[in-house]
Amino acid sequence: MTTAATSPVSKTKSANSSSSSPSKRIFNFSAGPAVLPEEVLHQCQQDIWNIFDSGIGIMEHSHRGPVFDRVIDEAKADCRQIANISDDYEVLFLQGGATLQFAMIPMNFLSPETTADYPDTGVWTTKAIKEAKLFGKVNVAFEGSKVGYAYTPSDSEIKQTPGAVYMHYCSNNTIYGTRYPKMPSSNSPLICDTSSEMFSRPIDINKHAMIYAGAQKNLGPSGVVLVIMRKDLIAKGKKNLASILSYDNHAKNDSRLNTPNSFGIYVIGQVFKWILKQGGLTAIEKRNADKAKLIYDAIDNSGGFYKGVARPDSRSHMNVTFRTASEELDKKFIAGAAKLEMDGLKGHRDAGGMRASIYNAFPLQGCKVLADYMKDFASKNG
Ligand SMILES: Cc1ncc(COP(=O)(O)O)c(C=O)c1O
């Protein structure tokens, strides 16, 4: 069996490694913060010390100086190129993670006399619904809790409200490992939390009024959230808000209303360059599908030893969730995987079992190692 120790990943030595810094990396299946591209990490090592030959590291530069101007301008331009984002949209880098967006969206656009639609497909949409109820009427347009959050709804299963001010959905449900195979249709402006699959497959920006993603899965460090928002929606935001909670203020100040997470934005910019180098979203989607197939095949060909949590037509390509017949066996599986240098496979406490998070930067080799281990474990414990 191949292990992490024999993979090309583990052989990569960091550019600046000293005798005390560990050079070996293992397979990191963490749901987030999660694996980043090795090339990006190496570039970060250099730029933390001295970026663009300025003699100053990226974290030490003023957020209003020419070096950071270049960093944020390139990040926005690359983001636009990746997803073909037109001038009708703003690209913003905000703080507070995706969770602040759960509150900021209704705070800006929902009122006691208006309704927003929220299909509930898991823990993160449930949290978003809770926040929205503080500001206005919420129609839970699909109740995923009734089906154990095992799948995402088809258009006909989503009960929309005529005249809703927006519909909010989560394209990939990190905890249960489900995704919308195709984006839902909506009669109202569509808002998507795509935190756990941002830029893992092509996304039709023009069909959305807003897309947001906490960075720590596919984009960079935690804390930053990428927001892509149509300008006409921004203009509809309430005017009597605290300045830091208004999208309009953030847009007018080029994401620099106050001191932004400049390092986080820099890393995201590097990840965007890496995505472009990989061939963009179509190439990334294909690689992710190949990676996910290896693990789903190991589930499906196990003769029932492993059970997938998600209904097959809703299976996520980012978070693969599965269980054995008992919690004891799940624990044994996770302990055995750790010995083979596979980390982060324990499922979320709400879903149990195992979860393999295999974001864009996670190597194909790691999926092969896991699939081999799954076969081996099933044959010894079945
Ligand atoms: C789909 C989704 N939305 C929102 C969040 C919350 O993100 P944050 O911790 O950045 O607030 C997460 C975190 O895992 C997530 O997976």
Image: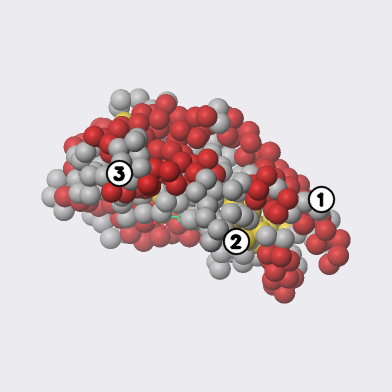
Is residue 327 among what the camera can see?
yes
Circle nearer the viewer, 2 or 1:
2
Q: Which residue is mark 3?
A: 56
Between 341 and 83, the one lying in front of the other is: 341
Above/below status of 278 relative to 376: above
Q: Which residue is mark 2?
A: 344
For numbered disc 3, what is the local secondary structure? loop
In the picture, the quarter occupied by the C terminus is bottom right
- Pointer 3 local density, CA inside 10 Å: few below 14, some 14–19, many at least 20: some
Between 69 and 322, the one lying in front of the other is: 69
> Which amino acid type is shown beneath numbered disc 2?
Gly
Q: CA distance from mark 3 to mark 2?
A: 35 Å
At x 16%, y 50%, the residue is 243
Q: CA distance from mark 2 to mark 1?
A: 23 Å
At x 53%, y 61%, the residue is 20
Q: Quadrant of residue 134?
A: bottom left
At x 48%, y 60%, the residue is 123
> Residue 70: image x %, image y %?
30, 33
Q: Which residue is mark 1?
A: 301
For numbered disc 2, what is the local secondary structure? loop
> Which amino acid type is shown beneath numbered disc 3?
Ile
> Which amino acid type is shown beneath numbered disc 1?
Asn
At x 74%, y 54%, the residue is 3
Circle nearer the viewer, 3 or 2:
3
Question: Are circles 1 and 3 on residues that touch, CB within 8 Å?
Answer: no
Which circle's residue, 2 or 1, is located before the other in the chain? 1
Which circle's residue, 3 or 2, is located before the other in the chain? 3
